[in-house]
Amino acid sequence: MVVSDETPTTRTPTIAVDAMGGDSGPEEIVKGVARASLDTTIQSLLVGDERRIQEILDGVPYNPEQIAIEHTVEHVEMGEEPKAAIRKKRRASIAVAAQLVADGRADVVVTAGNTGAAMLACSEHFKMIPGVRHAALASVYPRHTEHAAQDTLALLLDVGATVRCDATELVQFALMGNAYARRVSKVAQPRVGLLNMGVEETCGGEVLVEAHRRLRRIESINFIGNIEGNELARGRADVIVCEGLMGNVVLKLLEGLAEVVDDLAGVARRENWRWKLGIMMLASGFGKTRDLTDYAAYGGAPLLGFRNLLIKSHGRSNALAVHNAVKVAAKAVRDDVTGEIAAAIQALG
């Protein structure tokens, strides 16, 4: 979504940042937070090995008045089994970050680390919004725009928090995604679509048919019906709802496409002039495909359903991605995304 570090709300949020998470932690994580300290008013609380964090900060420009460190040496590796890691490492950086938010010392968590561990840490330390049955992990990605004032980023949820869903959960995901898009994108009536195998309301089996029926009756959201996979990169829907299994497959497919594009470009550079000419002619299209997974540009996406927020960044996040994730997190707090979700769930009854 369009990210600005300044909004008309009151206090400055404090972001608990898992400094040890991700493929490039703590180096790129700390550099991203340092960058945010120079061009925003956001307060950051870096959670991790204090000595390593301070060494990195000493090598880059930063504002010490906006960065504090919460020391812990434990962290969850990207390849670790989440349940076992969280159980064994009670002072893991992601667990400490979540505890800081639960205790009121920070307002939101940002992590590029192990996704499963992040969700478990939230489940352990955060309370669910009343009425919400399951959390939903969202993903944002660039797409074409087709309407005036439409955000350049779409929101897809769930992408892995709830593998299989019933109709009630899909409806709640729609309400949560709608609330996030309204608050963060500033679009009064985001277009909400249900990802399905066809546009007809009878497609997809009992669960999707029932979810479609319920969503059509909710006046508080702008439900546009079913959308198919080939419409994901277009501007027809601003919020796309699906169960976690399907959403995760879609997300990995988009990432795979970007990798294929990079591989083709590399091959072309090594081949004859015909290959190079062909790649030059397709350069614009390749660039648009690569943009679909430009995680550095948007920073991260939320885990929705808890009273507190977590912004999950890509595991390969660089300093720019972390910088943007911190800004997204602060904006979500300032714009009271969780309050909007709670009101929507309560109104549904």
Image: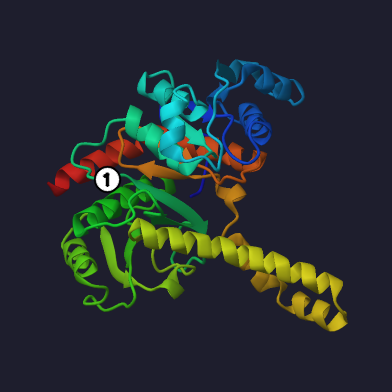
Kindly identify the residue that appears in the image at 58 percent across and 51 percent down: 295
Looking at the image, can residue 330 be seen? no
Counting from the top left corner in percent of width and height, residue 146 is at 46, 69
Q: Nearer the viewer, residue 247 or 279?
A: 247
Q: Nearer the viewer, residue 76 or 193?
A: 76
Kindly identify the residue that appears in the image at 83 percent across and 83 percent down: 274
Looking at the image, can residue 125 be seen? yes
- Left or right: 286 in relation to 89: right
Amino acid carrying label 1: it is His
- Left or right: 91 in relation to 24: left
Q: In the rendered view, tell whether residue 287 sits above or below residue 128.
A: below
Residue closest to the far right: 272
Q: Nearer the viewer, residue 134 or 179?
A: 134
Kindly identify the residue that appears in the image at 44 percent across and 58 percent down: 248
Counting from the top left corner in percent of width and height, residue 82 is at 45, 39
The quadrant holding residue 54 is top right
Judging from the image, the colouring scheme is rainbow
| Helix, strand or loop under label 1 | loop
Q: Nearer the viewer, residue 132 or 238?
A: 132
Residue occupied by mark 1: 134
Counting from the top left corner in percent of width and height, residue 349 is at 12, 46
Q: In the rendered view, tell whether residue 127 sits above or below residue 317.
A: above
The quadrant holding residue 285 is bottom right
